Image (tube, rainbow, N blue to C red):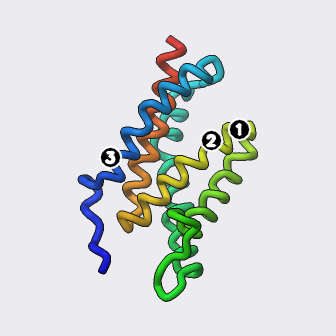
Amino acid sequence: MRLPPTPFRLDPHLIAALLAAVPVWAALGLWAGPWLRAPAGAWGWFSLLLLMPLLEEWVFRGLLQTQLLHVTAVNGQPRRWGPISWANGLTTLAFVALHLPTQPLLWALAVTAPSLVLGHLRERLRSVWPAIGVHVAYNAGFALTALLLRG
């Protein structure tokens, strides 16, 4: 019998997803500091911190992953590649593909791990809102790292 998920505000996976980002931002600043760019102007910040996380998570985790969970399930259980559901893996492939036209290949591929984390949170907590919140936090940390390095 599977227990219901804990409230996402207390979920250890949610906390781990947020804490794991801190060393990533530090490493990113050390490795790619000269190439990082903070958003320009109010629209850039609004887009990075609110608009894009909301749109991307609603479309990818809210719509696509939810539908893929239904169509790839066997006997009501998601099919998996090890710990990753097929729905999460396929959604992540689509998410990476979305980033390919606007980012260099390595930057686009770099969204793979965060996308898998966001998909895991969506499935574990049965809501798109934790993924939106973590996406906002990831983008904010990335932008603040770039801003601090510029100063």
- When the figure is inspected, residue 51 is found, relative to residue 144, above or below; the finding is below
Q: Residues within 10 Å of mark 2 (few under 14, many from 20)?
A: few
Question: Percent x, y for residue 42?
Answer: 49, 30
Residue at the limit of the structure toward the front, as seen here: 82
Distance from the alpha carbon under mark 3 to that under mark 2: 21 Å
| Quadrant placement of the N terminus | bottom left
Q: Is residue 127 left or right of residue 48?
A: left
Q: Which residue is mark 2?
A: 110
Q: Residues within 10 Å of mark 1 (few under 14, many from 20)?
A: few
Distance from the alpha carbon under mark 1 to that under mark 2: 6 Å
Q: Is disc 1 in contact with disc 2, using a CB cutoff of under 8 Å? A: yes
Q: Is disc 1 in contact with disc 3, using a CB cutoff of under 8 Å? A: no
Q: Which residue is mark 3?
A: 15
Q: Residue at 57% of width from left, 74% of height from top? A: 68
- When the figure is inspected, residue 86 is found, relative to residue 24, above or below; the finding is below
Q: Residues within 10 Å of mark 3 (few under 14, many from 20)?
A: few
Q: Amino acid at mark 2?
A: Ala
Secondary structure of residue under mark 2: loop
Mark number displayed over residue 106: 1
